Image: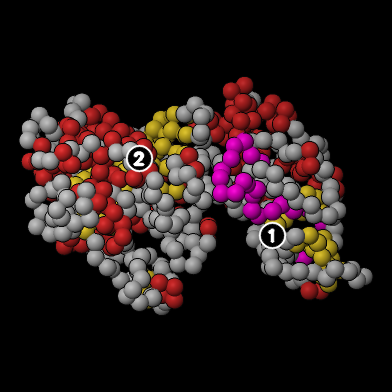
Amino acid sequence: MTDQASFALRGRNPDVLTCIANLSNDEVFTPPDFARRMLDTLGEAWAAQNGGQSLWANSSVRFLDPCTKSGVFLREIASRLIKGLEAEIPDLQTRVDHILTKQLFGIGITRLTSLLARRSLYCSKFATGEHSVARSFASDDGNIWFERTEHNWEDGKCRFCSASQRTLDRGEKLETHAYAFIHTDDIKSRISGMFGDKMQFDVIIGNPPYQLDDGGYGTSAAPIYHLFVEQAKKLEPRYLTMVIPSRWFAGGKGLDEFRESMLSDSQLRSIDDYLSAADVFPGVGLKGGVCYFLWESGNSGPCRVSTHFKDWPVSVATRPLQQDGADIFIRFNEGVSILRKVIARETGQDRSLSLSEGGRFDRLVSSLRPFGIRTYFRGRNTEVEGDLLVYQNGGTGYIARDEISTGRELIDCWKIYIGRAAPGTGNRDTYPHRIISTPFVGGPGTISSETYLCIGPFATQEEAESALSYLHCRLTRLLILLHKPSQDTTRKVYTFVPTQDWTRTWTDADLYERYGLSDEEIAFVEKIVRPMGSGDDALVVTSLEESDDD
């Protein structure tokens, strides 16, 4: 075998897979260092369940990347197997051929990425090419499968992935983004058609497309990564590990069933959660962070949860994913104990993380569009007698009272307004941060567009100011964060926040004492949540001057 096939691929300077740019935010390339981190976790789990034996010294294990892009997972696995199987298969060329033809398989998500994956794994875009390090393939594709797949349109949507026919039914010259792995009702038969009958994979690993690039934007685009996870489980591997957005912990469009399934699955053995996606994928605008999980068939128990953020010490705890009374995953390990103390103080019991309906702050929070006015609404610049003051996107305006048919019971009460979208810095999650936009008190005769939620009603200005002081408290905003999957702060994110006595001004010192937080818990709250700035201190405002200084 020639020197070019030495498989010292990581020794290239620089490693080309650290240099390529992402095609889009929904198809993100995995950095080699992060892929190696996932493989380390996988290898440790294998050894723990197989008497200390090395996964990389097993010549019978089959690996599948069902959504390969750069081929980084397959390349890194190949490098480990090349070293681990040296004793069993001493001849290098024979060893390489065995690994590439019998153990490593991938499904390209586009024609371009299939070529890139073959180049990464075989050192040639064709498995049978002159420069390929494999010598035993009969087809140019090798074990990196790709064929153009079409969507299955029904009533303008794909029945498999819900893609828009108007956007993605665009002819043969452009990619369909109909990913083969999730466009089938029978994934086992589909895999047999790709790689042959009786193909059983021990390990499925990958970084699936996160959402459909079909005209949606940001959080409005429909997620599809959960479809890859669900299909992979149907193949019944021994191990499944994928890197996906962390938004599924508490939110995500159409992810309720997926979240319930994941949280009730005791075979989910570990989750490594990264609060900032930029720490994993530099330059990618993905709010809410990312995580990778390890699922192990037949091995049940509590899950190891590790939280990572920049140079902070990694927080690690082994705990049940599903907490009694909570329908989401509590992201922060430290947050579980704090939330338990709050719930226990308010309910007299510490088993269920749920408040009584009457004691939940979210009952005071309006639904979206509290007065039926859209974000783009612009009121009159001048007031006519009897008009209502409207807090709208970019300032204030006026509207006649008889034009409002929704939320009329709130018009003549005191209330608090708070922006739906929380502040942030560009595309990055930052800590500590405010969690919510700056709330302010609105008096009788005021309303808002859907730019804001309305909290109330309160009988007096003093009650509204008391509730506003409560929202300024760091602990209150931490409880909001525990249920907040993204920038969007809907009514639901207030689920863990209890109501209080609205006859006083609240401070964090009051809340820390009320709920018996330890010094360590207080330090955690103050590390995650920053105080409202000096520009946020006024309890009542007459004009909207929102600043975003995060």
> What amino acid type is highlighted by mark number 2?
Pro
User: Which type of secondary structure does the marked residue at label 1 adopt?
Assistant: loop
**Residue 418 lies within the magenta run:** yes
Disc marking residue 451: 1
Q: Is residue 31 magenta?
A: no
Query: Quick check: 500 above or below 446?
Result: above
Seen in the picture, residue 255 relative to 337 is either above or below; the reply is below
Location of residue 386 in the rendering, given as x and y in whole percent from the top left corner: 90, 69
Residue visible at 79% across and 52% down? 545
Task: Report the quarter where the C terminus lies.
Answer: top right
Single out the mark in the foreground, 1 or 2.
Answer: 2
Left or right: 338 in relation to 405: left
Q: Nearer the viewer, residue 97 or 41?
A: 97
Q: Residues within 10 Å of mark 2 (few under 14, many from 20)?
A: few
Is disc 1 surrounded by few (<14), some (14 to 19) or many (20+) residues within 10 Å? Answer: many
Q: Quadrant of the N terminus?
A: top left
The percent position of residue 378, horizontal first and vertical second, equals 76, 69
Residue range in magenta is 408-434
Q: Nearer the viewer, residue 109 or 396?
A: 109
Magenta: main secondary structure equals loop
Residue picked out by circle 2: 14
